[in-house]
Amino acid sequence: MKNLVSGLLCAALILTALLTGCGETTVQNPDPGTAEVSEIDPGVLPAEEETEEPSYDPGIGSADYKGRDFMIMDRTPDSSGWWISMDVYSEELNGEPLNDAVFNRNETVNQYFNIKIQPHRIPDGNFLQTLRNSAAANDHVMDLAMLTLGTSISSAKSGLLFDLNEFDVFHPDAPYYTHSILRDTSILNRNYLAVGDMTLVANEGTWSMMYNKQVAENYGVEGLYDLVRSGEWTVDRFYSLVKDIGTDDGNGKPDLNDFFGILTTGDAYHAFVYALDYKVLDKDENDAPVFRGFTERLQEAAEKIDRILNDDRITCHGQLGGDWSVFQQMFEGNQSLFYSEVLQCVTRLRNMDVDFGLLPLPKFDELQEAYHTDVHSWASDALTIPTVAEDPEMSANVFEYLSFASMSTLKPAYYDKVLTYKAMRDEDSVEMLDYLLDGRVVDLGYLDDTGTVYSGLHTQLASGNTDLASFFEKRERSAEKQLAKLLAAFEG
C-alpha cells in the first residue's frame, strides 16, 4: 500500500510541475491526498522553490467531529452508463488515477476533521424532491449535495441551499474554484453553488472542439493552436476552413457516408450561441439578473451559426440520422476535420489511431475578449450546502477543505485522464484544456429557461429561421414576468 501511495504522489507532483504556467494557476504544494494529516497545515503551505507561484493559504482550521459519518448527496449512474459520479467517493485504491485521487483526498479530509465521508446516491431527477422531503421532515439526511447545475438553481429558488458567502471559510477567489461560473451564477451577490477542481463531472459536461490532425494535414490546415493564442480563432476563420471541405460519396445527396467539415449534435446550436458571447440573462450593478433581449450582435451571430450548422455539406449533427456514437466512429474514420462535443467524448476516443487536438469554440470576432465555453446544465455538477445540513459550519469547513485538497489531487488526475490519448500528450493540449475550463460560462437564463427563450432559440436556429427580432418580440413579456418571479424568490 505504501509503495502505491508513494508512486501516486510522485506522479501527481510530476504532472503538477508540468502544468505550471498554463492557463489557470496550478499551485505546487505537497499532495494533500497522500501526505499524512499531521504534515498538512492549511495555514502554512511551503511554496515550490523552482517557481515563483505563491502557495495558497485557505486558512481552514482543523476540528474533531468525533468520527461521525459525513453524507454527500450525489448522482447514481444514468442509463447510458457514461454520466456517473467520479468526484465524491471511492471505496478503495485500485490503481486507477482518478479513483485513487478521490480516495486519497477523502482520507486526508477524513483524518483532518475526524469524519467518515459517505455517499448518499440517488437518481439526479430526484435531487430536488429529496431536498424538499428532507426539509419537511427535518431529518438532516445530507451534509453536502453535489447537484446538477440546473437543480442547484431550482433548489436555491426553493430556499433549500445556503448562500456560501455566509460562511467565513468560503474563499470565492481561491484558485480551486472556477471564477467565471461563480460570477455567472451569483444572484444579488449570493453564491449558492461552486464549480472547480472538486467537480469533475462539470469538466465532463464542458463543450469542446476537437480536430483530426491527419485530415488537417491532408487539407493543409496548420497553426490552429497559434490562432487560439493570438485571438484570431474566430467563427469567420472557422467557416473559412469548413465551407468548401465537404465531399459527397458519389450518390449526389448528403448522408453518413460523406465527408464533413464538422461532426456534432443538436446541442451545438446553443454551444455556439454562448461561444459567440450571448446570454439570455445579464447582470446589473446590483448583481441582479436582467433580460438581455434582442441585439444586433446576436442577429449577426445567428446568421453565422446558420451558415455553418444548417449546411448539410459542412455539418452533420443528426439531421441525416445517427447519434454521438456514429459521429465518433466517423471522426475516428477521418470523415471530418472537426468534431464538437462535451469533454467526456474526448476520453471516449480510445481506439482512434489518428492523432487529434483540442480547441475552444471560436469567438465572435477578434475584439471578443475571451473564448467562451458552454457547460451542460444536466451533465455538469456543482457543490452546494443544503439548508438541511445538521451542522452548517461543519459542512462549510469540509466543503472548503475538499475543494482545496482537490486542487492537487483531482485536477492533476483529471488532466492526466484527458491528455493521455494520442496527440493529447503535449504542452499545447494542456494549454488548450486550460482555455476550455477557464473559459466556461453559465447563463442563468439557460438554467431557468427564462421565458422559454433558451429552448425556443435553440429550436428556431435549428429550423433555419434567423428572424430573431420577431422571436424576441413574442417572448419578451413572458421572459420579464418569469424573471420577476426568479428575483422575488431571492429578494425575500
Image: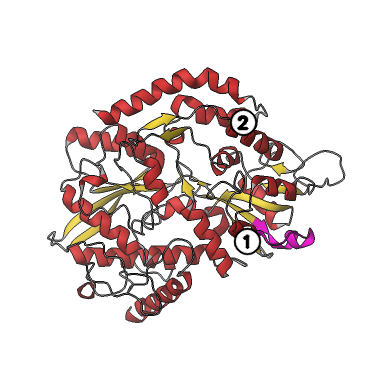
Q: Secondary structure at mark 1?
A: helix
Residue at 30%, 43% in the rendered image: 191
Please state which amino acid type lies under the numbered disc 2. Answer: Gln
Q: Is residue 149 left or right of residue 309?
A: left
Q: Secondary structure at mark 2?
A: helix
Q: Which residue is mark 1?
A: 225
Quarter of the image that includes the C terminus: top left
Tell me residue 83's x, y (percent). Answer: 46, 49
Tell me residue 286's x, y (percent). Answer: 32, 35
- Give the vertical position of 223 relative to 337 (above or below): below
Q: Is residue 194 magenta?
A: no
- Examine the image and state in which quarter residue 364 appears: top right
Mark carried by residue 19: none
Residue at 28%, 54% in the rendered image: 171
Residue at 29%, 37% in the rendered image: 130
Which region of the structure is painted magenta?
211-226
Q: Is residue 212 visible?
A: yes
Q: Is residue 92 left or right of residue 168?
A: right
Q: Is residue 221 magenta?
A: yes
Q: Which residue is mark 2?
A: 299
Please state which amino acid type lies under the numbered disc 1. Answer: Tyr
Instruction: Report the Cα–Cα distance between label 2 and label 1.
Output: 28 Å
